[in-house]
Image (spheres, rainbow, N blue to C red):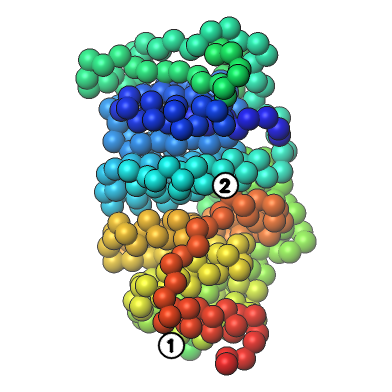
Amino acid sequence: MTGKGRILFVDDERRVLNAMRGLFRRDYELFLTSEGADAIRIATENDIDVIVADQRMPGMTGIEVLAEMKARSPRTVRILLTGYADPTAVEGSINLGEVFRFLSKPCPPQMLRETLSLAISASRTRPETTAPVPRPPQPETLAQPVAATPQQPQRETSTPALSERILPAGQPQTRPARPEPPQPALVPPVAAANDTGNVSKPPSAPTTPDVDSRADESSSHWQTVTNVVMSEDTVKETSECLALTSSNLGLKDVSVVIFTVDSEFAATAIRACSADRNAVLATTLVKVAQAIQHENAGVLVTDFTTNKAILQKIIAALKKYMPELVTIVVNNGRDTTDMINLINFGQVFRYVLKPIEPGQLRTEINAAVIRHLYLLNNPESVKRHEVTAAPKTAESSSTVNDFLGRVRGQPPK
């Protein structure tokens, strides 16, 4: 894909949209709107590379907009730019919106510029397996404000909606012809997870009837799980990925490393792992490194029962060194700063709260395995999960370097 990047900004503050116009109109083809519902309409009519959404808006929140964008336009890279970093919004940006970055207002222009450049590049690196939405040939005038329809949420103020399309400097302002928006792909229901085979349990892990009763069940459900639609993925691509990995690599060959010192959570995580997959319990970073090196680990499940600052840097380092490794973080609560760091520095796949039932965690692990195999088979797509370099300290640098050395099989210095 060539040409100017297409960026959609959605924010109910006109001054913010005016600032975005002033900063980026020379570099990108801009779409500006003040309403979430209108942003969805724009995305269905145009092939958008990146969407930047505010969180607190009348009608639809930013997370709701980004979650809808993930379903309707999975190629579009999603960024949340907000001055209200409430814990629920940050958690939703991980689990629902699967955002590329979480940026706080006011965001330094250079940081925003660099982030948009990375996001544009990421949006155009995934393999094209479906036809892109056609771009209108020769539109005529600047898009006019779009009146809310009865189906659209009404604004809480009397300020009229703002909706514009800004072409890069030197090109005429235009209004696209409106083709019929493509219908979102219909997703078949989830097949029940059978979780068959054998799990490698630590000696202390309890054997439960729930695990034992699955031993004789068929693992054919892996062939039919097609509704785990990932941020860079369509239903068709997910199905193709499953067919490829099931026949060549084998889903059962993907190990899950569980890093915790919480015995109750360890037992839950062991039960949650598919019984046709190796589950390795690690209680130290040394054991985590050994498991990643020797056990063909594709998913890391960890809680924050150890040094959180060090663990965040370990997750960030692993994402840079092994971008195909998918991480699920489980915690006792929602710490906004921790979650934002895990997004921007670690691109964690899921953030879930304790206590968690084995069935719920099993669903997240199954989705994480599919994401791992997709990245393994499509290495160019790892740019969609590129992370910001985490700040370094003397203590963390030493620990992280020693950890990565062990992952690489190098003896500690």
Examine the rendered structure and indicate whether residue 294 appears above or below residue 99. Answer: below
Mark 1 secondary-structure assignment: loop
Q: In what quadrant of the picture does the C terminus appear?
A: bottom right
Label ID, residue 118? 2
Examine the rendered structure and indicate whether residue 376 appears above or below residue 107. Answer: below
Query: Picture quarter containing residue 14?
Result: top left
Mark 2 secondary-structure assignment: helix
Q: In what quadrant of the picture does the N terminus appear?
A: top right
Residue 200 appears at what percent x and percent y?
56, 80
Nearer the viewer's eye, disc 1 or disc 2?
A: 2
Q: Foreground: 32 or 40?
A: 32
Residue 160 appears at what percent x and percent y?
30, 14
Kind of residue at disc 1: Ser
> Quick one: which residue is furthest to the right in this view?
248
Q: Foreground: 141 or 280?
A: 141
Examine the rendered structure and indicate whether residue 227 appears above or below residue 44. Answer: below
- At a point 59% along the width and 13% down the height, the residue shown is 172
Q: Foreground: 403 or 18?
A: 18
Q: Residues within 10 Å of mark 2 (few under 14, many from 20)?
A: some
- At a point 37% along the width and 72% down the height, the residue shown is 309
- At a point 60% along the width and 27% down the height, the residue shown is 47
Label ID, residue 204? 1
